[in-house]
Image (cartoon, rainbow, N blue to C red):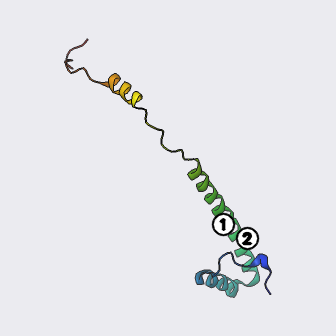
Amino acid sequence: MMDPRLQPKTPEVDPMVTAAVKNVRDRFGAEGLRDLIAVATMELRTAEAAEQRLASLSQQAPGPEPLDSADTQAWLAYTEVDPDHDPNTRR
C-alpha cells in the first residue's frame, strides 16, 4: 500500500505527468527522479506563491466608490467652460 502522503492530490493523474515521470525514470534512473523531485518542489513553491499573490489581489480589489451626485455637480460647475469666453483673448 502506498504512503498516504505520497498519494496524488487529484483523483486521476494526467497521463502526460505519468509519462514524464516514467521517461525520467527510464532515462536517468533513481538519480534523475531525485533531480525531478527537487526541481518540481521548487516549481511547486513558485506556483503556489503566485497563486497566493493572485488570490490576495482579487481579495484586496475594492469595489467602485459610490457616486455622490453633489460631487459630480460641483465638478461640472468647476470645469464648465464659459460659453461667452473667446479663447483668443486673455482675461
Please determine whether, in this image, residue 45 is positioned above or below residue 58. below
Residue occupying image coordinates x 64% and y 57%? 52
**Residue occupied by mark 1:** 43
Kind of residue at badge 1:
Glu
Image quarter in which the N terminus is found: bottom right
Q: Is 33 displayed left or right of 15 in the figure?
A: right
Q: Nearer the viewer, residue 91 or 69?
A: 69
Q: Earlier in the sequence, mark 1 or mark 2?
A: 2
Q: Is 72 displayed left or right of 11 in the figure?
A: left
Label of residue 38 in the image: 2
Kind of residue at badge 2:
Ala
**How far across and down, in percent of the image, does residue 70 sit?**
40, 27
Please determine whether, in this image, residue 30 is positioned above or below residue 40. below
Q: Quadrant of residue 15?
A: bottom right
Label of residue 81 in the image: none
Q: Quadrant of residue 37?
A: bottom right
Image quarter in which the C terminus is found: top left
Residue occupying image coordinates x 46% and y 38%? 66
**SS for tag 1?**
helix
Q: Nearer the viewer, residue 16 or 53?
A: 53
**How far across and down, in percent of the image, does residue 6 sit?**
76, 78
